[in-house]
Image (spheres, rainbow, N blue to C red):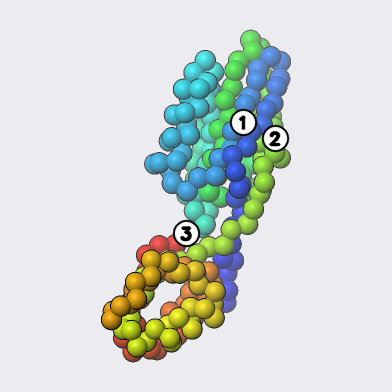
Amino acid sequence: MLFSDSYKTIENSCEGIYKDRGSKFLAFAFPVHKEEEEVKEHLQLLRKEHSAANHHCYAFRIGADKIFYRSNDDGEPSGTAGKPIFGQILSNDLTNILIVVVRYFGGSLLGVPGLIAAYKGAAADALFNSNIVERNIMEVYELSFPYDAMNDAMKILKEVNAQQWDQDFQLECKLKFSVRKNAADDLITRLKQNQGIEIRFIETK
């Protein structure tokens, strides 16, 4: 049984805005892949650029499996900021995305319903201005084989449209390749049927 080996994300950074009773909610959406590096870097830059803002609330989801996610209210009442931002990620079925909504307080309290609507609206506007794309889930491997097995190995890789790089063809040949997740098991089985071919899994991306 084949499972979906693709996911949706945004192609480039984009922005949105929502205003209510003097408060401005500026939304910034970014394509991201790693929490420690990219998410923290975007947050630090926005906090520096908008140091006068009252709140920097955000939500993100990372990974093709869509399991790893977080949201943060950054001082707003619990559930009024991060959760509605994340709700827009869910409703658009996106991953590998960070949305930060920066709030400048306008002097009037909006209440819980008003805050939820504002953070949801700002995030929705950013996504409305985005270009949503579908990406394939790829598995990356390193392949090594004797020179006399090159023709067989290259023929199999070509038949499944595997993407190749870091090629080193000598007596002992090596290369790296990526292939769509749903095609990986069959490809590995076919390669292993050839004597001398060794395969090492590197990552899923």
Classed neighbour count for the residue bearing mark 2: other residues with Cα under 10 Å, few (<14), some (14–19), many (≥20): many
Q: Is residue 204 above or below residue 82?
A: below
> Where, by quadrant of the figure, is residue 35 drawn?
top left
Which residue matches tag 1? 27
Is residue 170 shown left or right of residue 76? left
Quarter that holds the N terminus: bottom right
Q: Residue at x 48, y 78 (%)?
A: 157
Separation of residues labelled 3 and 2 (CA atoms): 28 Å
N-terminal label among 1 and 3: 1
Q: Are marks 3 and 2 in contact (CB under 8 Å)?
A: no
- Lower position in the chain sequence, tag 3 or tag 2: 2
Helix, strand or loop under label 1: strand
Q: CA distance from mark 1 to mark 2?
A: 8 Å
Q: Is residue 142 left or right of residue 33?
A: left
Give coordinates of residue 72: x percent, y percent.
50, 33
Q: Residue at x 60, y 43 (%)?
A: 12
Residue type at mark 3: give it.
Lys
Q: Which mark is residue 125?
A: 2
Q: Earlier in the sequence, mark 1 or mark 2?
A: 1
What secondary structure is marked by label 3? loop
Callout 2: SS: helix
User: Can residue 200 be seen by looking at this rendering?
Assistant: no
Which residue is drawn at the image coordinates 40% and 62% (left, top)? 203
Say which amino acid is labelled 1.
Ala
Picture coordinates of residue 204, whole percent (x, y):
44, 62
